[in-house]
Image: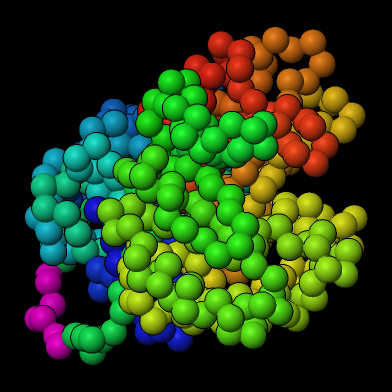
Amino acid sequence: MPLSYPKTTRHRLTSRLLIAAVAVASVVIAGAATAESASAATPADELVVNADFSAGVQNWRTNLSSDRLTASTVSRSDGKSARIDVGSPGITVLNDSKNTVSAAERGAEYRMTAWVKASREVTAQIRAREVADGSAEAHKTESRPVSGEWTQLTMDFTVERSGAALDLNVVFAGAAKGDQLYVDSVSLKSVAVDAPQENPTVGQCAAKLPLGDTRFGVSLGTSDGSSMQEGWDRAVQAYGTPDVVRVFQRGAPNWNVTKIAPSSDLSISFKIAPKDVLSGAYDSRLRSWFQSAPTNVQVYWTYFHEPEDDVARGEITSADYRAAWQRISSIADETCRSNLHATLVLMSWTLDPKSNRDFDDYYPGSAAIDVLAWDPYNPWNNNTGYKDPEAIFGSVIAKSKAEGKPFGIAETGSTLMGSDTGVARAAWLREIGAYLRDNDALFVSYYDAVAPSDQNDFRLRDTSSVAAWRALVQG
């Protein structure tokens, strides 16, 4: 079940983190302190097993088998800490091997803390995942730089789901192979529940975004002449029922896809010329479309995806594009539909300095946009193999965070590189899936089609690639 936060029609979410923070009346603090200022004593109300690593790394593990976890005497006092020797670059996670709380009560309040340091500067955050009914929702701090001095991270949060297990993680980003990461004194304690206060936002809209695991799916493209139904049938046969489907429409949008994919989240885009939007000619049809949206799935709706080339060709202006977005977004706000998320979709190329493009030319502003989504692909021009996930997705993740927005991957894919029969591509798919999940992508849609513009074939038709993407879809 998604967490929610209060929202007026003029102010949207500022980040995925804030959703959890405001929704559950939590106060998230990512503060620094010196080791000398903390007590070395273990309080009687401590919930974490082996919180100070006095029993080595018992009850702790890393998410990647390539990372080496040991106990270390490099600690804040005379005790021990957990040391992780990084085996793979990117995201490194210290995880309680048995969830610290097996069944939390809805409304219970907790404080989580941890001390961290690293052999060179990386970023770190703590998070507590509510795990229940096969899904997870996360409370977490902002990522903050850490290096050679002990830094404390602190987070207060309130449980949203009754009976949820609490899974505690310390997450490092930006570490390279061979780096040493240290964690000491991981703590979780109950805190007193404040007296209830009058809700100052009664009567206002409530926007919701899922905070659980990344949703994986495919596009239902029809560029090869097949129907949307045929695309759906092919996807289900290959991958099982997708968690999310990507749908492209021209002109005024419709909900025909819900007849085909009634239980999948939707990444749906439509294209209407900005001048026609600004004339008001489509106001009524768009208002009706938003009002008749499905209520049982998340809908990431997009006006005019990838506008950059259209602007470059002079077919539309960036000013009209932004203004049209703002008009449509305000119409969507009228419905107060909590599962509708205004999602800007741009090319990842736009963030490359060599593109000579400016993100702000296409950004209608934070008030109009809920989610930033992107279309990064493995480069195919020079047949240079499968790139590291960081090289493909790092810039879009960083930009999304800089704008304070959660992100999704509306399209991604790779042609078969060189003589690869699919085995190497399958390994790459697993790698990008893990990378995007660890970086909290809301959704990832594989472009399972032949590109209509250049006829590059991104379809997954070899056994290895199909199996790899199926595993991600099935979770």
- In this image, 336 relative to 328: left or right? left
- In this image, 113 relative to 132: left or right? right
Is any atom of residue 314 visible in this view?
yes
Asked whether 396 or 238 is in front, the reply is 238
Task: Based on the picture, tell me whether residue 409 belongs to the magenta stretch.
Answer: no
Task: Work out which quarter of the rendered image holds the C terminus and state it.
Answer: top left
Residue 203 picture location, percent across and down = 23, 86
Where 411 sits versus 345, above or below?
Answer: above
Question: What predominant SS class does the magenta segment belong to?
Answer: loop
Asked whether 93 or 471 is in front, the reply is 471
For image coordinates 45% across by 86% down, the residue present is 10
Residue 202 picture location, percent across and down = 21, 86
For image coordinates 67% across by 37% down, the residue present is 223
- In this image, 198 relative to 409: left or right? left
Residue 168 picture location, percent across and down = 31, 45
- In this image, 107 relative to 240: left or right? left
Quadrant in the picture for residue 337: bottom left
Asked whether 116 or 407 is in front, the reply is 407
Where 460 sits versus 257, above or below?
Answer: above
Figure disc tally: 0
- Colour approach in the figure: rainbow
Is any atom of residue 471 visible in this view?
no
Quadrant in the picture for residue 360: bottom right
For image coordinates 62% across by 78% down, the residue present is 277
For image coordinates 52% across by 54% down, the residue present is 268
Q: Which residues are magenta?
A: 192-198
Task: Based on the picture, tell me whether residue 195 belongs to the magenta stretch.
Answer: yes
Residue 327 picture location, percent across and down = 56, 82
